[in-house]
Amino acid sequence: MNYQGWVQGMEKSLVSTLLYKYPELPQHIGIVMDGNRRYAREHHASRHEGHSSGFETMSGILAVAYSAGIREITVYAFSIENFNRNPDEVEDLMNIARDKLGELVAKGGVANKYGVKINVMGRVNLLPLDLQELANEITEITKNNTRAVLNLCMPYTARDDITHAIQETVKDLQGKIRNNPEYNISKIHDLKQDLHENENKNDNETSTLQSKAANDDTSNKPNSSNSSILESINISEETITSNMYENTLPLDLLIRTSGTYRLSDFMLWEITMSTYIDFVADLWPEYSPFCFMKSITKWLLWKHDWLKNHPQNCHT
């Protein structure tokens, strides 16, 4: 091992030890790994070297996080929008993904060392076939790991994830309706009318219905079969969440590197009032374990202050 590698190893070990002693750690961290190309330009290196350095940084941060006891990490590895980049760069990114996923399949790496379940999260069908196979293989190999989770978002956007969840919710509800033994096509009109009345009642309509009900107790009530169908069409936040690509832990901390102040269509559904967002100036390949510890320290201090005003919202 060269001197630089030794120093990096010592840094990771020290930060992991320090974080382990923290009174509390975020249990789910999302990372937008931005700045690989700018890093390459500033260091007069190729894009390939910039992206490779970014993957090395990711490996180091994951090792620190899982050693310290953080349960879930979600990284933005490749956006669906990235397919619009220069074809040579896209192919380069696919080749790096092949190498890294291939290493995980062959050697286990972080998955075996820390008991990590790996999910490849997003429109996997948009990847080249060999990468789809690698993604499925690494998911299958690690599915029984329970100590921690790594969500690799590739190819992914939050809007696509939300759209997918709504589509899956509709499919589920269509199945419930079709499988209802009392359901038949002739009741569609009545069902639509019931839904319209339930959603658009105002005080005057309610008064009118109550008046009619005095003369006919059942005249304006949906029939029992329609009622059971209506009950099955109760869509909540939990319904949508359960149909996302992955049903993750609440997002505690979101880190975005490179000094860019935007979310870039990442984890928009999972971000809540209790998510701390840390926009840092470092380019991703320069984001060290000490930078990671600083982000977690800022989250811890922010959470302490935030919970003074929102004690009912603590989820950890």
Image (cartoon, helix red, strand yellow):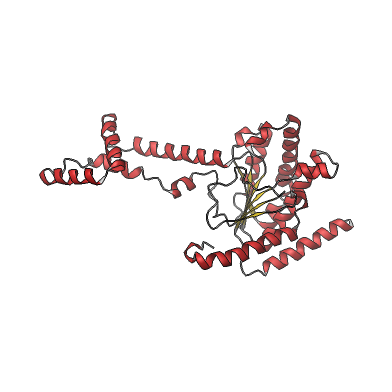
Q: Tell me which residue sits at (65%, 50%) in the image.
A: 31
Indicate left or right for 275 with 46 as reference: left
The answer, for residue 278, to whether it is visible in the render is yes
Q: How many marks?
A: 0
Q: Answer whether residue 51 is visible to the viewer in this image.
A: no
* Residue 138 position (above or below residue 18): above
Q: Residue furthest left?
A: 215
Q: Position of residue 139 (x, y in %)?
A: 62, 45
Q: Residue furthest front?
A: 204
Q: Where is residue 73 shown, x and y percent of the image?
A: 63, 53
Give the x, y percent position of residue 69: 64, 62
Which is more toward the observer, 157 or 138? 157
Q: Quadrant of residue 250?
A: bottom right
Name the quadrant containing residue 7. bottom right
Residue 53: percent from the left, percent from the top? 79, 47
Q: Is residue 70 left or right of residue 40?
A: left
Relative depth, front residue between 261 and 115: 261
Quadrant location, the N terminus: bottom right
Residue ID at (47%, 37%): 167
Would residue 257 appear left or right of 174 to someone viewing this image? Answer: right
Observer-nearest residue: 306 or 182? 306
Residue at the location (16% across, 40% down)?
A: 219
The C terminus lies in which quarter of the figure? Answer: bottom right
Residue at x 66% of width, y 64% of height: 297
